[in-house]
Amino acid sequence: MDSYEISANAKINIFLRICGKLPNGYHKLYMVMQEIDISDDVTVNLDSERPAGIDVVCSDLMGLDPTKNLCYKAADRFYARLHKKLVSEGTREKIVFPHTEIILRKGIPNQAGMGGGSSDAAAVLLALQEHFGEPLNEEELNETAVNIGADVPFFLYGGTGLCEGVGEVVTQLDAFPKWPLLIVKPRQGVSTARSYSEVDKLDLPPLDKSRYEELFRELLETDGDLDRADEVLDRNRELLINDLQAPGIDEVPVIRDIISSLEKEGASLALMTGSGSAVFGLFKTTEDAEKVRKALASDARFSDCDFFVTGMI
């Protein structure tokens, strides 16, 4: 049996803009995603001595259909893609894939907008790519990933990424500043499907990509100096928005209170991530983030929230 152990990191969205809707119902996105130091542990065991099949083991999945899990879909679609490719290349011998056991140990909160399921799925794809000797090229792997979920292609790369299309076009921004951050996760989650449905009814602010490109240039030129980076954020505050935040607040009103409190406590930026319900605040130091964590944790309004002081990767 061959075994692969991977740390699947979470993400936040520095901003998230919706640029339109495709005929298939998917939304066109323009967003920066940032990998952070909160993770799930993913173990992929491949055993050729057992009958072919895919098992997903996770205490958080008790009572749920494992075939709905993104890790299951990742393995299933990887094998389907690889089988199709081998057949097209004229492979004549019978193709039998090993029994695949995927064990998840969750550290990323669910229904948070932090990409836990997508990161886990990407980890499975990368493990299978390694096991089978990198059989899929970058385009094939990206196509497989985006067919699992819009966030999955980003996690093939990690770090800081500008993600476009439905998420499959990823441009890495390697020298982005790395702020310490505080994440506040309400117990109640936000329905991603409902958020996208509701955002279609809104009159969203226009998207000027040239202004974002200038923002990226300015942030990259700070060379990681957070004082200079904060000045850049202040000058470009109107660009740093999440188009899904308003529907998220409608469903989970405490999100508004969390954002307001983080801003009052001095966060350089406070925003809901993804489709929510987690909110992050950027700070200059870990000590500042920890101080604000203690302040918010003692506030009765946030008694059902989880708090994470962490950093960017």
Image: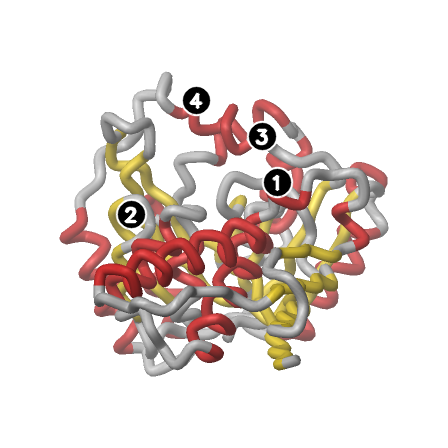
Q: Tell me which label, 3 or 4, sits earlier in the chain.
A: 3
The image's colouring method is: secondary structure
Instruction: Classify mark 1: helix, strand or loop.
Output: loop
Q: Residues within 10 Å of mark 2 (few under 14, many from 20)?
A: many
Which residue corresponds to the image point at 51% horizontal and 24% vertical from the top-left? 194
- The count of marks equals 4
Which disc number belongs to residue 30? 2
From the image, state whether disc 3 or disc 1 is nearer to you: 3
Q: Nearer the viewer, residue 155 or 130?
A: 130
Which disc number belongs to residue 197? 4
Distance from label 2 to label 3 (Cα)?
20 Å
- What residue occupies the far left of the structure in this picture? 210
Q: Quadrant of the N terminus?
A: bottom right
Distance from label 1 to label 4 (Cα)?
16 Å
Q: Nearer the viewer, residue 136 or 233?
A: 136
Distance from label 1 to label 2 (Cα)?
20 Å
**Is residue 246 among the parts visible in the rendering?**
yes
**Is residue 260 among the parts visible in the rendering?**
no
Question: Badge 3 is on which residue?
Answer: 191
Question: Badge 1 is on which residue?
Answer: 277
Instruction: Classify mark 3: helix, strand or loop.
Output: loop
Kind of residue at badge 1: Ser
